[in-house]
């Protein structure tokens, strides 16, 4: 692996051969997450592909010329021509492997993969999920000198990192941008010394043996496991949703509202998330129509008052979406009036769906006692039905799912585990 400056770009990158170029920055958690993967893959593919790094801040004009707008960004070149996908953000090892493999012949890829050696590492505790629950457990365990690893399929932070503003986390007088709150939580836990394995593929989880396989080749064994995998947005499950997910239908206002500057959107839902996110979207969009199945919103009074005072937002009560279609550059939502059965069409530039969440339990759903809604049942120390396996945060069966309650669960599990390990 070699570090170059823009002066060497022509000779080292465009000069021929197969090259992967990593634009990185300092103080960049996603860059830190990708660095060990880049190094590990350089050892495997290094005879066939040149692995090159470039410090983005010091080589800005070249980065801009190549369309690099965030760090890290990985670009792939074959004989001086940029090829494949541009990888940015929480880059997974499997994403890089996919691009590297497409630079080589099938035979060569098979030869290289024969050299992949499985690794095994041992920890006292493995935490699955680095949202507020997992990060807090990681902090307490680290401070109790318990050897802990945090594993996440994405970058640390969980749902808070994509929440535009958090106004109810104690200790902050002013509302905090969600990404800052989650960044601070993550840095605090990392600085303490908890090991991070983030933006990985979790290939297999064996709760009985307390073993987790990440990125297909790395086995993590631990004495205890904490499940802190949170929840994912519910889908509507109606025609057109799968097809236009990410192409006109979004589940994340922080990520996508900025693309609807002066445009019209439909927001589905009427709970706190829908109401608060609609208010955020109204900073950009010129008109928002909310579609809610009941006669009244279910969000709290304060959020409702703010919504009804917002002239850009109107609510279609007692209506449910039945299908989404695209007509030109517009998204058309067909809605049914639940009282009359009449169907009408709402034409907008985009649709946001906030209709609740479901627990992330796919890799172990048959192994644990769950409630009727598939949330994990725990006792007051966060033990699940399996010995040595704990669960915390939004993934567990409880009444209220907030950052504060996830943080509390993480605290309890960590203290209980630290005592048990002693
Ligand atoms: C739009 C929105 C706005 C919100 N606003 C507020 C608010 O203002 N105030 C408030 O208190 N709460 C708010 N919440 C709720 C709050 O975000 C959650 O209660 C909190 O994030 C739960 O933390 P958690 O650690 O349990 O889970 P999460 O934050 O969901 O984190 C779970 C983590 O697990 C990872 N993961 C998932 N599957 C796996 C797997 N198989 N292996 C490894 N890792 C995995 C995910 O990538 C994620 O990083 C909001 C939620 C939403 C959706």
Image (tube, rainbow, N blue to C red):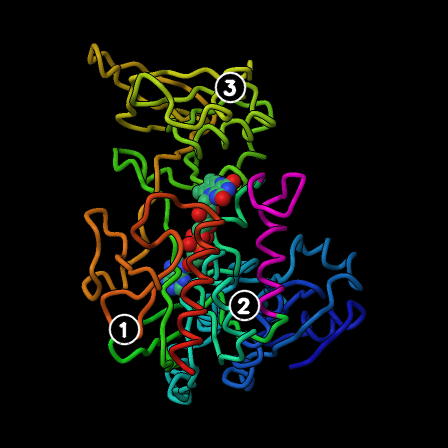
x, y (%) of residue 204?
30, 72
Q: How far apart are the alpha carbons under marks 1 and 2?
A: 22 Å
- Residue annotated with mark 2: 139
Q: Is residue 216 left or right of residue 147?
A: left
Relative to residue 224, is residue 232 depicted above or below? above
Magenta span includes 157:
no
Mark 2 secondary-structure assignment: helix
Quadrant (top left/top right/bottom left/bottom right) for the N terminus? bottom right
Which is closer to the viewer, label 3 or label 1? Answer: 3
Magenta span includes 186:
yes
Please rate how many residues cluster around mark 2, counting C-alpha atoms within 10 Å: few if below 14, some from 14 to 19, many from 20. Answer: many
Q: How far apart are the alpha carbons under marks 3 and 2?
A: 38 Å
- Residue annotated with mark 3: 305
What residue do we see at 56% from left, 69% from top?
33
Relative to residue 281, is residue 146 depicted above or below? below
Please rate how many residues cluster around mark 1, counting C-alpha atoms within 10 Å: few if below 14, some from 14 to 19, many from 20. Answer: some
Mark 1 secondary-structure assignment: loop
Specify the label residue 207 is tagged with: 1
Q: How far apart are the alpha carbons under marks 3 and 1?
A: 46 Å
Mark 3 secondary-structure assignment: helix
Q: Nearer the viewer, residue 8 or 182?
A: 182
Q: Does the residue tagged 3 have its C-beta within 8 Å of any atom of ligand 1?
A: no
Q: Nearer the viewer, residue 306 or 416?
A: 416
Relative to residue 346, is residue 239 depicted above or below? below
Label 1 vs 2, first from the N-terminus: 2
Q: Is residue 255 left or right of residue 292?
A: right
Give the magenta part as a residue range: 167-190
x, y (%) of residue 236?
29, 35
């Amino acid at each position: 692996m070699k570090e170059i400056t823009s002066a060497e770009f022509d000779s080292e990158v465009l000069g021929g051969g197969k090259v992967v170029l990593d634009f990185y920055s300092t103080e960049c958690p996603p860059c830190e997450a990708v660095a060990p993967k880049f190094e590990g893959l350089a050892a495997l593919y290094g005879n066939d592909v040149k692995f090159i790094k470039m410090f983005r801040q010091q080589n800005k004009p070249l980065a801009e010329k190549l369309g690099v707008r965030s760090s890290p960004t990985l670009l792939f070149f074959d004989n001086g021509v940029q090829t494949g996908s541009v990888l940015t953000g929480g880059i997974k090892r499997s994403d890089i492997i996919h691009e590297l493999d497409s630079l080589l012949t099938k035979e060569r890829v098979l030869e290289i993969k024969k050299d992949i050696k499985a690794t095994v590492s041992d920890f006292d505790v493995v935490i699955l999920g680095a949202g507020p629950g997992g990060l807090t457990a990681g902090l307490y365990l680290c401070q109790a000198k318990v050897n802990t690893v945090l594993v996440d399929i994405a970058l640390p932070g969980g749902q808070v990192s994509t929440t535009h503003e958090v106004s109810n986390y104690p200790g902050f007088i002013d509302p905090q941008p969600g990404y800052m709150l989650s960044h601070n939580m993550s840095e605090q836990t990392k600085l303490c010394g908890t090991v991070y394995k983030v933006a990985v593929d979790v290939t297999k989880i064996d709760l009985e043996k307390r073993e987790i396989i990440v990125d297909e080749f790395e086995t993590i064994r631990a004495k205890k496991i904490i499940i802190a995998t949170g929840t994912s947005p519910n889908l509507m499950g109606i025609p057109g949703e799968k097809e236009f997910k990410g192409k006109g239908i979004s589940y994340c206002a922080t990520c996508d509202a900025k693309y609807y500057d002066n445009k019209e959107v439909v927001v589905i839902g009427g709970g706190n998330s829908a109401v608060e996110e609609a208010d955020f979207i109204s900073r950009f969009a010129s008109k928002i129509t909310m579609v809610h199945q009941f006669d009244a919103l279910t969000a709290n009074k304060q959020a409702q008052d703010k919504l009804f005072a917002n002239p850009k937002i109107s609510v279609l009560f007692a209506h449910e979406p039945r299908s989404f279609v695209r007509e030109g550059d517009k998204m058309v939502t067909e809605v049914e009036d639940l009282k009359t059965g009449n169907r009408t069409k709402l034409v907008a530039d985009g649709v946001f769906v906030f209709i609740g969440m479901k627990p992330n339990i796919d890799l172990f759903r048959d192994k644990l006692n769950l409630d009727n809604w598939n949330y994990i049942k725990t006792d007051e120390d966060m033990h699940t039905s399996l010995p040595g396996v704990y669960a915390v945060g939004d993934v567990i069966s409880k009444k209220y799912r907030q950052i504060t309650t996830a943080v509390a669960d993480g605290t309890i599990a960590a203290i209980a585990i630290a005592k048990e390990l002693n």
